[in-house]
Structures are given as structure tokens and as C-alpha cells.
Image (cartoon, helix red, strand yellow):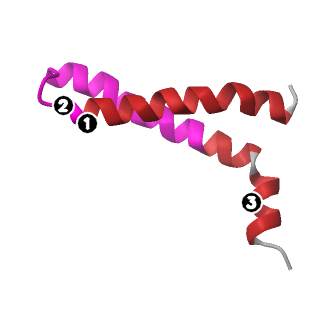
Amino acid sequence: MKRNTALKILNPILLVFFVNQAITVIFRDSLSPSAFEIFHKTGGAIFIGLLALHFILNFNWVRANYFSK
């Protein structure tokens, strides 16, 4: 799979997990502890993994903009 195709798939998924994190924090008092555990903590772990993949796929851009000579 090409890098751009992977990013077109990955970026909306990242958005969904980002919104999930924000919503679960806003409504944490309305959620049961087990629901909060599933949605926020597990979702956060997945979100961090997806962010790492996003960084890896965009590393050429990072290198060109931050590590240029």
C-alpha cells in the first residue's frame, strides 16, 4: 500500500479516536467505570499507537522540516 493511501485511511481513524478521547473526558461522570475504562483508556492506547504509525508514515516530512541542514 502506498504511503499516501495509508494516510488517507489512517487520518480519519485518528480523528475518530481523538474525538472519542475528548467525549469520554467530557462525559466521564456519566459513564460507568468499566465503560470509561473501555472507551477512554483502551481508546487512548490505540490512539497512541495510531499516532506512532502516523509519525512513521510522515517521517520524511518531519526530517525535511525539522532536521534539514
Residue at the image point whose x is 83% and y is 35% from the top: 3
Mark 2 touches mark 1? (CB < 8 Å): yes
Residue 41 belongs to the span the image colors magenta:
yes
Left or right? Give the position of 22 relative to 9: left
x then y, percent, for residue 48: 50, 41
How far apart, in angstroms, are the residues tagged by discs 3 and 1? 30 Å
On the image, which quarter does residue 49 sit in? top right
How far apart, in angstroms, are the residues tagged by discs 3 and 2? 35 Å
Mark 3 vs mark 1: which is more N-terminal?
1
Mark 3 touches mark 1? (CB < 8 Å): no
Q: Which residue is mark 2?
A: 28
Kindly identify the amino acid type of the residue bearing the numbered disc 1: Val
Q: In the displayed image of the protein, which residue is found farthest to the bottom?
A: 69
Kindly identify the amino acid type of the residue bearing the numbered disc 3: Val
Q: Which residue is mark 3?
A: 62
In this picture, which residue range is highlighted in magenta? 26-51
> Residue 14 shows which numbered tag?
none
On the image, which quarter does residue 13 sit in? top right
Q: Which residue is mark 1?
A: 25
x then y, percent, for residue 32: 14, 20
Left or right? Give the position of 27 relative to 16: left
Question: Which corner quadrant holds the N terminus?
Answer: top right
Mark 3 touches mark 2? (CB < 8 Å): no
